[in-house]
Amino acid sequence: MVTAYQAAAAVPDPELPMVTIADLGILREVREDGGAVTVTITPTYSGCPAMGEIAASLRRELGRAGYRRVDIRTVLSPPWTTAWITPEGRRKLTAAGIAPPPEPAEPACAAPAPVPVTLTRGPVRCPRCGSASTRETARFSATACKALYQCRSCLEPFEHVKEF
């Protein structure tokens, strides 16, 4: 039998279907208690329109796994950060031609902490050829959490998941 966590962790993100909600760090906790399942999720940003679809997919997949009582809880604190994207999630994004945000210098902390202000950021590397010679062509892409870029080396366009 599939555990509640396994069923929830396999749910794909509706906007980035090559990664799961576990890969993105959206899935925070799955608790089983007497036949009931409580799933805690955090949106990538406040007001993310994909949250309704994610909740529906969680209910559907947990139902298929035999769980009938499912409660979906959305928590906003601490806020989601791109540091929560797993190495596997970063690999899958790159394989799909989407540049992931840079890996965090330090491990992500689950406790609220001051957010440092970054005035400059490193180059966005092309997920196809690896070149750091890229340029942003549009601040927003198909979703608000992605931007459009073009590689100056191979000339290919690509999306980039923005840092949060």
Image (spheres, grey):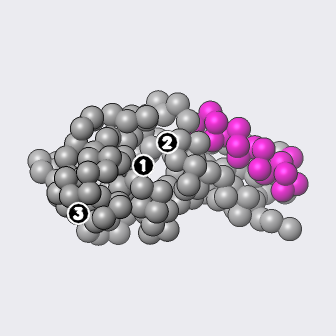
Q: Is residue 162 left or right of residue 45?
A: left
Instruction: Kindly identify which residue carries mark 2.
Output: 43
Instruction: Kindly identify which residue carries mark 1.
Output: 80
Q: Earlier in the sequence, mark 1 or mark 2?
A: 2
Nearer to us of marks 3 and 2 is 3
> Could you say which is closer to the camera, residue 140 or residue 151?
151
Amino acid under label 2?
Pro
Q: Residues within 10 Å of mark 1 (few under 14, many from 20)?
A: many
Q: Secondary structure at mark 2?
A: loop
Q: Is residue 37 left or right of residue 12?
A: right
Indicate the quadrant containing the N terminus: top left, top right, bottom left or bottom right: bottom right
Q: Residues within 10 Å of mark 2 (few under 14, many from 20)?
A: many
Distance from the alpha carbon under mark 3 to that under mark 1? 28 Å
**Residue 85 in view:** no
Identify the residue at image location x=24%, y=38%: 137
Query: Residue 143: which quarter of the image?
Result: top left
Query: Residue 18: which quarter of the image?
Result: bottom right
Nearer to us of marks 3 and 1 is 3
**Circles 3, 2 touching at the beta carbon (< 8 Å):** no
Q: Secondary structure at mark 3?
A: loop
Instruction: Kindly identify which residue carries mark 3.
Output: 131
Residue 98 image label: none
Q: Residues within 10 Å of mark 3 (few under 14, many from 20)?
A: some
Q: Which residues are magenta?
A: 51-68
Residue 75, percent across and down? 52, 43
Is 63 in the magenta? yes
Residue 89, percent across and down? 48, 62
Q: Main secondary structure of the magenta part?
A: helix
Identify the residue at image location x=73%, y=58%: 7
Residue 13, percent across and down? 57, 47
